[in-house]
Amino acid sequence: MPAEPYVLAEWRVRKVGLDYHVDVDGHFYSVPHRHARASVEVRLTLRTVEVFLKGERIAAHMRGSGDGKHTTTPEHMPSSHRRYADWTIERILREADRIGPSAAMLCGLILEHRPHPEQGFRTCLGIVRLARPFGPARLEAACLRALQVGAKTYGSVKSILDNRLDGQPVGRAREGEDQGLAIRHPNIRGPRYYH
């Protein structure tokens, strides 16, 4: 008799993403970053996920639920991501909130819309650090303008500050320009049609 009970395993072929994670049933598992874009084999059991490249195991994780979250081993991260490992979403948002509500909201949106939060850390930290050369008041105004125009990058916020657009209102209409969006045409029904 075997010492341990037989464990049923399932094998799948997957491609490692640019963010050095493999998607397995809606959950993302890290592999060493140097294997980004590689084709790998994944061995799934009820409790574990093992990733193999050319027969060699390169990663092993406890199996997570398909919740769209990431399981990341710090050793798998490139050094540029590890540098921000002691930063948390809460800490970044706290730093941004010290500048103002617009900076906090912009950083929150950046972190929320990245597939992996670490990808947004560098952008948010860069934005927060713009308070040194430009001052918190100008940075807060630039973040407000970035939110108004839908810009969510460090480069956009820096460009707003460099070009002194933080003090100008967004979408200023020219004198005599019609502000309304009403278009008259026989094929357009208008608001009365729906009441």
Image (cartoon, grey):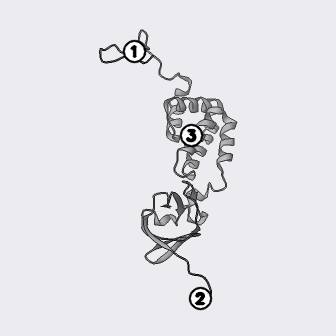
Q: Which residue is tagged 3?
A: 109
**Image coordinates for residue 145, horizontal then vertical, percent:** 54, 29
Q: Nearer the viewer, mark 2 or mark 3?
A: 2
**Image coordinates for residue 149, horizontal then vertical, percent:** 49, 30
Q: Which residue is tagged 1?
A: 182
Q: Which residue is tagged 2?
A: 2
Cβ–Cβ under 8 Å for marks 1 and 3 = no
Q: Is residue 188 left or right of residue 93?
A: left
Structural crowding at the residue carrying mark 1, measured as other residues with C-alpha within 10 Å and reported as few (<14), some (14–19) or many (≥20)? few
Q: Amino acid at mark 1?
A: Ala
Structural crowding at the residue carrying mark 3, measured as other residues with C-alpha within 10 Å and reported as few (<14), some (14–19) or many (≥20)? some
Q: Amino acid at mark 2?
A: Pro
Question: What secondary structure is marked by label 1?
Answer: loop
Q: Nearer the viewer, mark 1 or mark 2?
A: 2
**Image vertical order of residue 160 relative to residue 95, above or below:** above
Q: Amino acid at mark 3?
A: Leu
